[in-house]
Image (tube, rainbow, N blue to C red):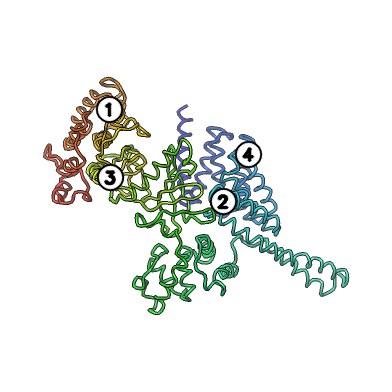
Amino acid sequence: MFAHSNKNNAAQEGYELAQQYLHQHKYSEAETLFQKSAQEFEKVLGAEHRRTLESKFWLAQSVYKQNQYAKAETLFQKSVQEREKVLDAVDRGTADSRFWLALTVYNQHQYAKAETLFQKSAQEFEKVLGAEHMGTLDSKFWLAVTVYNQHQYAKAETLFQKSVQEREKVLGAEHNDTLNSKFFLERAVSKKNQYTETRQPLPELVQKREKVLSIEHEDTPKTKPLASGLSAISQLSIQPPAETVANRLGEYFGADKCGRAQYTDFDIARISLLLKQANPEWSKVPRIYIILRTIGCLSHLDTFIDLGFSDYWLPFTERSLPHCVRPSQRSQFVATQNIAMTQSLDLEKGAAGQHCNFDQKEVLPLEEKGIIGSGGYGQVDKVLSLVSFKEYARKRVTRHMAFGRRTEDLQSFIAEIEILKRLNHHHIVEFVGSYTDPRFMGLIMSPVADMDLSTYLEGVDTSRHMELRTFFGCLARALEFLHEQKVRHKDIKPSNILLHHGKILFTDFGLSLDFTDAKGSTTVSMVNGMTPKYCAPEVVMFEPRNTSSDIWSLGTVFLEMIACLKGRTVEYMDQFIAGHGSRKALIRTNPDALSEFVAELRGTGNPADNAALGWVEDMLLVQQDLRPTASSLVASTISSSKEGGKKVAFCGICCVSRHDDFLDEADESENI
């Protein structure tokens, strides 16, 4: 039994390592490990076990990534057969295998066979996962491509048209996949018009010459290469040839376009897509390309790129242009640049920018890179700006919440935008921009965090204790700033505190209160959306509350941080509170357990950390006016404590200001 378990664990470890190799593009190493894990899973769990089937699928993937298409075809074919047998003919796994089999066949120019496979995978994905799933959309797109490569342009036009409609509905008009479908739709229309004019007469001419001159006549064979040349279209890559790219770009810069007042975001997106086929670096600066080409100075573009200039630098002044631009050209550039200045450039201007409104026909200059998280009424994802090519975090909510019961959620989101817009602090996420499109309202923020504090605390060890200690002062300093700006956060908890390259940041101001125009910070309202564990007693009891409620919430977070410094875990802390005193799970309802837990922590770990326990006891006092203010908390963290002859830094150098000498002393004495 134990041998069986050990073999299973070894196979699992090999499988996970193979996945890492695959993501690192080490395809040969991944192939070896997937092969081995498939054999081990099959031996231990059986040929029909899910792990065995998955290993064989990823084995085929690793072979495909090495461009060994014939070998990959055999492996994917076997994967399809085995998954159909074990799972179902209509199953997500079967559809995945069939889709990749189709791609493998396509790459071997077996377009008719690939067409059948893509058709079937599209049907399977749609039945299992729905018409809007990426697998369904991708299968239908590649189905259109295979039809196109068989020069069935009328049929391809219909399929690409449907692909455009479906991708636009699901992904939006500005998404790269939608733009690709539109690009090839235009190619299909263009080819259909050319092909129908030339394809039919040539075969007829061959037949006519054979009939009139005989098959053996010397002029008959001369006609055949003309007809067969058309068949060579099927061997074309789906990427447009260089001359086609040049011609397509020329359409935006013809003589009739010289006096154009403005390029649209859609124009710029299309130009960028075309440039990507010819020069990927140029595709990242489509606006500068447009301006330089318009004034006849395109030879300067590489210098702009080499010097690190991007579209994000627009608008330029004559003095801010690079040295390669001659004085006579500088005024020309500045006068012309407005033709490429769209509202997309305003999206990353921070508080100085304007809220952008994109209609159905306009392109949102953001590329989705993956979901970070979802909440009760919104979603946070990572996006890439197609203007600055910087990565941001985007929070967005659907606009239909403007009506009905969710109106308050949308109002909270708008309030969050307005609050974040006026907060500028190095320990608060940065407001980049905001927008509205037909479906969503979006908030763009920086940075994209590495993790939140709850995840950090799960993996913290003694090697990171010095860093963890500094978070006390930095969080206190950020809260002090919020309260000085007349803002109460109202939802402080570890999941709303982010880590980015060692810097700690407050985020999520969706429940925050701006009391700038109020007579005071004290309010009475319902508890709406807060997490009970971090909720101050007065909030739960619907009693008047003020900035001290934030202090309570931060005190609970601080207690979790101290527990980890003392060698405990957050889970241990929760179990301790629930198992002592009144045995109630929450600190605010079980003060006796809190006292016992603080006493236990005080007797273990580094005695110098006990100073933080004193702050926490004060922060978690039931009587609001006895809790420290954020400013006094900052002072406490900076002055730190001196116990057992050891002095430690509870504040990062970024927030110490005039106490640098103290921090230097603390760094020298740290030996944890």
The quarter of the picture where residue 669 lies is top left
Task: Tell me the SS state at disc 1.
Answer: helix
The quarter of the picture where residue 197 lies is bottom right
Q: Name the residue at the left extreme.
A: 645
- Which of the two discs, 3 and 1, sits closer to the camera? 3
Contact between marks 1 and 4 (CB within 8 A): the answer is no
Amino acid type at circle 4 is Lys
Label drawn at residue 168: 2
The quarter of the picture where residue 219 lies is bottom right
Residue, x 46% and y 30% (percent of image)? 3
Q: Which residue is mark 1?
A: 587
Residue, x 49% and y 44% (percent of image)? 33
Task: Tell me the SS state at disc 2.
Answer: helix
Q: Which residue is mark 3?
A: 516
- Which of the two discs, 4 and 3, sits closer to the camera? 3
N-terminal label among 3 and 1: 3
Residue 216 is at least partly visible in this image = yes
- Which of the two discs, 1 and 4, sits closer to the camera? 1
